[in-house]
Amino acid sequence: MRPLEQKISWRNATLSADSIIFFICFYLYVWLFIEPRLIYHCFGNFIAYPNFSVDWTFLKTCLGYPGGLVEYIGGFLSQLYYFPWLGALVATAVAWLMYTATKILIRPLVRMRFKLICFIPAVMLLMMHNRYDIQLTAFLALSVVLWFSVVYEKVSVRNSSARIAVFLGMFALLYYIVGGTSFVFAFLAMTYELFVGRRKVLSVLFPAVAIGTYLVGKYIFDLQIEIIYLRLSEVLFERDPWIKGIVICIYFFFPAVLFVLGLWQELVSKKIPVDTFKILTKFKSLKTGSLRQLFQSDKAKWIIETALAIFILAAGIFISFDATKKKLVQVDYFAHKRRWSDVLTRARQIRPESCDTCCIHDINRALFYTGRLGDEMFCYPQEFNALILSRSEFQKPNGRIFLKRSRLFLELGHVGIAERDAFEYLELVGSTPRIVEQLATIKLVKSQTEAAKVFLRALNKDLIFGNRGRQILRRLEREPGLTGDKWIQYIRSVASDRESVSFTITADDFFLQLLNKNRRNRLAFEYMMACYLLNGQVDKFVANIGLLKDFGYKRLPRYYEEAIVIYMGSGLPKMDLHGWQPRRETMQRAQEVNRVFTLHGGRQNEEAIRAKLGPSFADSYFLYFIFETPRTRQ
Amino acid sequence: MRKPYRYLILICLVAAVTVVLWLALHKSTVTVKNYRFISRTPNIKPDYTDTVIPPNITPLNFVVLEPGVEYLVKIHSTQGESIDVSSRTGKIKIPLRRWRSLLNTNRGKKLFFDVYVKNKNGIWSRHATIANAIAKEKIDGYLVYRFMKPLFNWWRDIGIYQRNLENYDKSVVLHGKSFNNGCLNCHTFLNNRPEYMTLGIRSALYGSSALLAGDGKVNKIGTKWGYTTWHPSGRVAAYSINKVRQFFHKTTKEVRDVVDLDSGICYYQVDSQKIKTAPALSEPNRMETYPTWSPDGRYLYFCSAPILWVDRETVPPVHFDEVKYDLRRVAYNIETDEWGQAEIVLSADETGMSMLCPRISPDGRFLVFCMCEYGCFPVYQASSDLYLMDLKTGKYKKLALNSELSESWHSFSSNSRWLAFSSKRRDGLFTRIFFSYIDENGQAHKPFILPQKDPAYYDSLLRTYSVPELITSRVKVSKIALARAVRTTDKIEPDLPITGATPSAKQIAPWQTRE
């Protein structure tokens, strides 16, 4: 074992060629492939929002509880993910800090080159990024713990009492900085004292202090276990098993690895039992001849180690990368940015079964804004609840759904419901800049300027969007009613003014209230028609076909045509089509569907019917109407 | 390291520390000799002008909203040294000790703020003096309130907090996070004293219950308590049980609304741990709520409205916007546990409005209540205003402290001179706590907002303050003890009353079930 005094080469620890290559790859991968702006977009949508505010009060609040300081820094650094190159730099810096500290920590414990172990925390961080989560605060806290452990090891005090004092001081300080993560420090110090310092009393005392702190926290200060240990990651609430697993692993990784390495070194250096000795001899016998020469060659060592590091990185990427999640995040991101063509491009790359409700919702919005809802909506997966996310209130509360609903309902003109959903999000997720701006907009639409200003001043404190808040506030000073703001004026023009307090509302009332207010509310009209199509209510659909002329349609959209044909063939009373007539080929396609349907004995032979009709019918409304409307499913 | 470098580093360190200390401790002494006079008072925020303040209130820090590059405020009264506060941002933060001393030596006198503003050209101007009055009577030292974001259906972050009104200290009484993000409400104290307290709890994990703190211990009572009031003797607590439902408007400025589908009043006898009711408190076709005891304990005041719907499940029920509550009272003899007949104190037929939240001043002279257009939840009604009834004469009047927006959730200080209440006057959305001096004639003076260390604190605060309760000192029971009591399985399970209950409110009635 290396003597305690042995100096490590700082340059060797930090700037080895393989590590430089590794971290350059790491940086480029995160910057160009993961795209940190997507992770920033996930905050408050897919993952918890890392609170941060450029405000002394926020800083004081953070400094007021254990772990608050690292949460503050983690919150700040997370905000930098808005800028892709900077976000990648943050991730790389945290990974490098962990790598370097690990490398320094394992040196006194092992003679063998276990350098590869040092890359594992960085790979774990990368795996986290691959799942579009970062848990940056947790990783940052662990970095601080590791560097405290490095300092503890370097303290040249020999006396046990003095070392206890040093430990207690550092542990207390660390508990204040990183909260519960400081327990990792206690176990690292224990390992060091057990295998390097050889102070057995201390190696028992240190974990006892950690456990004692836990007991005091739980039984005297009444803290709950997740607050004591895992407040930083809130990992207990994590639904993705990968994320949960990685966070738990990283917490246990350092104490476990250092303990095993120390133990291994003990076994090697002491008298080894016969069986173990045989195994070791066998292992050592491999290092003979040409192999031995090869291993002793520095160049070869370097090549092997670098290759292994790259292999670990590649394996980590391969195993943990969630391509579907990335596409779902991209769809959400483009929808948020109102880049509708990009939404559709990306959506086409997602397997239908992987599209979640929110994704389908975004697809429908994108189809509307690109003028293709009536022509292409069944080219994409559809789900009745996705159109206006109508059933979400009966499910588990989901901030992302509340935000989407709030946005859609505001655009539709149901301002009251938009406000309610926005406040639900505010309570469940927190005051993210998106929701604060949304609430400010709602209040401006409702001419509640003073309330809007409260939200805008809160937005003003956001690191990224603070300027946006200030701009609107300045504009409000010049123009209190925002009469020149086209968006606000548009929402006011479509906003429903029919007071209603019904607990539940039918789709008819929902849309007709809006169309009664403004017959040019195209979004309300197309969504109403889409709603009837999705629900299989072709009678209601045809009853409203006359409204098409209000919106300047020159032709019948594809699915409108198919719905009319279905209605015509349904035997229901004839209705005025206001001059719209389906094309001959649409009638022929309907006849073909009818023929195949009859030939195969009806609905129970869905697979055979679909197979017979082939791909040209796969995206038709005929098949959706037959097999997929809520009524059909019942 | 060579020695010269060591000295250099040492010198740099000392210099740096000196600069930091100088910056921290140095206070520029601004003196203004020449200025031009502006005859109007300056705009300041919060509005601390022409108001009456308690002699023990924490400094009223404010922001001067006049354009300028430097500000000086001279705070003075009849006696004692004036306080000069200068600022480059307009934020005026008043030193606590000197403020206290000034207020204490000038009780019952005027307090003046002279505001000087320097413009870009270096010219000072002085505005007309802002005058406030210092009352002789102190306000109770602590305020307990509910602090949360504006809530709709879901909640995660609700806490009951206490604030020291003589400084800016704030602490948690109980937070929902300590029992799995539960909900807590209706904190009630006995005679403005912190020793005895009740608290309503709702939790998916630990059930609905009431906490009863007193004599150094906390008991969990396994029934759901609504609005609660302590008998002045501390032997009985009366509370309402409400089948309360929330619903939403579509186009109004306040989207939220609340209706009681049914309600009644019960009372809990502390010694016997029994829950009872009386015919006058649970009439068959009426809803009784918001009980409050008279300070002599001889009457229980409450609000009562007829049930206008047959279906007690539909939300909102028909005619929900026609429900108007009367103000009633019923005599009670605590020694014999006997109740009298309910009598109308003020009828909704007479006022045309709904009367809610009656609270009586501890001296027994005044009754303050909310009046709004309809319903049972004044905080969601912009029309809600505070009214005061002189119990000697039975006459009532609208208090001068009201605004165009909702005023509600009021409570008296133990000396009856201060009224704390919630108001949405600033923006129509976020409730903030205001205090008003009520003089011996029942005259309310211009209210002022709960002072904060940062005078711009409310400008961007996305949370509401509600249900302010004034108490004489800090809550005695710890948050740990309260949280443990919520989580414990040990609880008092008193039988719910069946005698005298309304037909709709028998034991099987929904509002009587333990939700």
Image (cartoon, coloured by chain):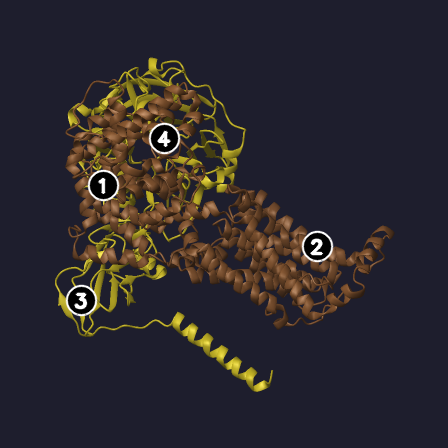
Q: Residue A595 carries which label?
A: none
Give A540 or B301, whichever is nearer the viewer: A540
On screen, residue A402 versus residue B425, left or right, reads: right
Residue count near mark 4 (Cα–Cα under 10 Å), binned few <14, some 14–19, many ≥20:
many
When the figure is inspected, residue B329 is found, relative to residue A273, above or below; the finding is above
What residue is disc 3 on?
B126
Q: Quadrant of the N terminus of chain B?
A: bottom right
Q: Which mark is in front, 4 or 2?
A: 2
Are discs 3 and 1 located on one and the same chain? Answer: yes
Q: Which mark is residue B229?
A: 4
Tell which residue pokes out farthest to the right in this image.
A274
Q: Which mark is in front, 3 or 1?
A: 3
What residue is disc 2 on?
A259
Tag 1, which chain? B
Q: Could you give the CA–CA distance between mark 2 and mark 1, rounded to whole angstroms?
A: 76 Å
Which chain is depicted yellow? B
Residue A269 x, y percent position in the rendering: 81, 60
Q: Residue B440 carries which label?
A: 1
Q: Could you give the CA–CA distance between mark 3 and mark 1, rounded to whole angstroms?
A: 36 Å
Q: Could you give the CA–CA distance between mark 3 and mark 2, rounded to whole angstroms?
A: 72 Å
Residue A622 x, y percent position in the rendering: 33, 28
**Chain A tint in image:** brown
Residue A553 x, y percent position in the rendering: 18, 38
The kind of secondary structure element at disc 4 is: strand
Q: Quadrant of the C terminus of chain B?
A: top left
Residue A135 x, y percent position in the rendering: 50, 51
Give B355 or B156, whichever is nearer the viewer: B156
Are discs 3 and 2 located on one and the same chain? Answer: no
Point 60% across, 47% down: residue: A214
